[in-house]
């Protein structure tokens, strides 16, 4: 949990700073007594007692009884922890083929998640219906009163106006329409009136990556996601970048190979995302079969050729797989080199299906970038696989909602 820096020496600033310090100490630990809080914060017992009174009045913390052993021979100390059931967060991720929903407590702790796939022919109405069904089920499964859901996050593919909660466009599904007011749709359809945040899926995933992939010193990084769709989340000096028109991170539409005879869903030619589409990679394998008759892939039926089979063959030095993967490595290295010169990150995390290609992918990528780039520069930039799983957009939403909860509290209030 990020602790906010509070400037100023006026009594209300000091009060606010102390209250926030105690809250953050409790947020970072499972539970603590007044003495333990005093050691961690350097504040007096009297000040801590006043802070705890305020935090209890805001239902942010609870007493969980007394410790087993006494401190310095005195009576057993009262133990405090974050009030995890103060409210609940509902997090929703609509990706290009499936919908995930999750319920989190405020810390955040994941209480449960549900998933449902959808097909390319499904309408937007079907998508909202799935969201409603999954939400109803997850609330029931976790025995949560709907009115205790106070915040919702919605992660979406495509262009999103985060400030207004508008889904500007999903380039893969133009039939779903443009400029959809997601805040109004979600609150109406779920019949929940609460704080809703909406953003591109990779921006939420980058916020989870900040917690789970980053080393302490890595303040500038790019979460590079490739799989069904392709995009990125950019964190600069610890803060998420969206850009003036919400295009920041839309690397799927970076022109990588302009001399191709097909166009991207966005209308452009040579977009990174259009080159990496799984059906297009499979098609490439099929067209090369005759040139590589002894390849493992050449002897598979069409329906058995998958991206995972390609990775397996590549790791066994299968020459057809080498041909296809070297081209993919080349596209990745061009995209990453472009990102390096525009963002100059400490690290790049690769998330999604290409993590299944194994360390050979990272090794080839690093070698290729170094061979086409300034010889010194890339050695300083770490390219690693993300540790995140398919629930990462839900986690990113939950981290975001926790920060909003804290931002909403008036720490200067007289209590
Ligand atoms: Zn495009």
Image (tube, rainbow, N blue to C red):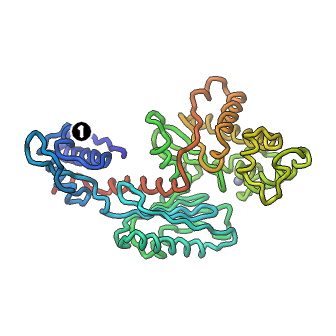
Specify the farthest residue to the front.
68
Above or below — where is 199 with respect to 272? below
Q: Is residue 165 visible?
A: no
Specify the farthest residue to the right.
290
Residue drawn at x 34%, y 69% as measured from the top left? 148
Q: Is residue 174 visible?
A: yes
Residue 56 x %, y %: 20, 57
Left or right: residue 73 versus residue 129 is: left
Mark 1, Cα crowd under 10 Å, few <14 / some 14-19 / many 20+, is few
Residue carrying label 1 = 40
Left or right: residue 185 versus residue 104 is: right
Above or below — where is 190 with respect to 24? below
- Element on which disc 1 rests: helix
Residue drawn at x 79%, y 46% as measured from the top left? 258
Between 170 and 354, the one nearer to me in the picture: 354
Left or right: residue 267 versus residue 164 is: right
Identify the image quadrant of residue 256: top right
Residue drawn at x 24%, y 56% as measured from the top left? 61
Q: Quadrant of the C terminus?
A: bottom left
Between 315 and 132, the one nearer to me in the picture: 315
Residue 105 x %, y %: 37, 60
Residue drawn at x 72%, y 59% as measured from the top left? 265
Above or below — where is 61 with respect to 325? below
């Amino acid at each position: 949990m990020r602790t906010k820096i509070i400037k100023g020496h006026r009594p209300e600033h000091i009060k606010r700073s102390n209250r926030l310090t105690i809250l953050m100490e409790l947020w970072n630990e499972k539970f603590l007594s007044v003495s333990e809080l005093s050691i961690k914060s350097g504040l007096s017992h009297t000040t801590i007692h006043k802070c705890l009174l305020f935090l209890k009045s805001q239902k942010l913390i609870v007493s969980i009884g007394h410790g087993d052993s006494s401190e310095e021979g005195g009576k057993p100390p009262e133990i405090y922890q974050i009030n995890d059931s103060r409210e609940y967060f509902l997090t929703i991720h609509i990706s290009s083929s499936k919908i995930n929903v999750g319920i989190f407590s405020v810390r955040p702790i994941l209480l449960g998640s549900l998933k449902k796939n959808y097909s390319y022919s499904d309408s937007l109405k079907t998508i909202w219906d799935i969201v409603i069904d999954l939400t109803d089920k997850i609330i029931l499964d976790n025995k949560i009163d709907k009115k205790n859901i106070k915040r919702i996050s919605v992660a979406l593919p495509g262009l999103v106006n985060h400030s207004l909660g508008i889904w500007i466009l999903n380039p893969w599904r133009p039939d779903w329409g443009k400029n959809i007011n997601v805040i109004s749709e979600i609150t109406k359809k779920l019949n929940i009136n609460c704080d809703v945040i909406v953003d591109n899926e990779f921006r939420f995933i980058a916020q989870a990556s900040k917690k789970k992939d980053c080393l302490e010193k890595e303040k500038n990084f790019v979460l590079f996601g490739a799989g069904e769709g392709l995009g990125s989340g950019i964190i600069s000096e610890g803060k998420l970048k969206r850009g003036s028109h919400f295009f920041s991170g839309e690397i799927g539409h970076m022109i990588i190979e302009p001399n191709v005879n097909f166009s991207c869903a966005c209308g452009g030619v040579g977009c990174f995302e259009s080159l990496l589409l799984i059906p297009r990679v499979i098609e490439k394998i099929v067209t090369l079969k005759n040139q590589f008759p002894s390849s493992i892939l050449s002897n598979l039926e069409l329906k058995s050729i998958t991206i995972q089979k390609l990775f397996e063959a590549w790791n066994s030095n299968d020459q057809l797989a080498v041909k296809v993967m070297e081209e993919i490595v080349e596209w990745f290295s061009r995209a990453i080199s472009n990102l390096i010169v525009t963002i100059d990150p400490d690290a790049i995390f690769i998330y999604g299906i290409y993590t299944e290609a194994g360390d050979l992918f990272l090794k080839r990528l690093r070698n290729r970038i170094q061979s086409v780039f300034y010889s010194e520069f890339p050695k300083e930039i770490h390219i690693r696989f993300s540790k995140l799983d398919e629930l990462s957009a839900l986690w990113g939403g939950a981290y975001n909602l926790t920060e909003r909860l804290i931002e909403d509290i008036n720490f200067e209030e007289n209590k």
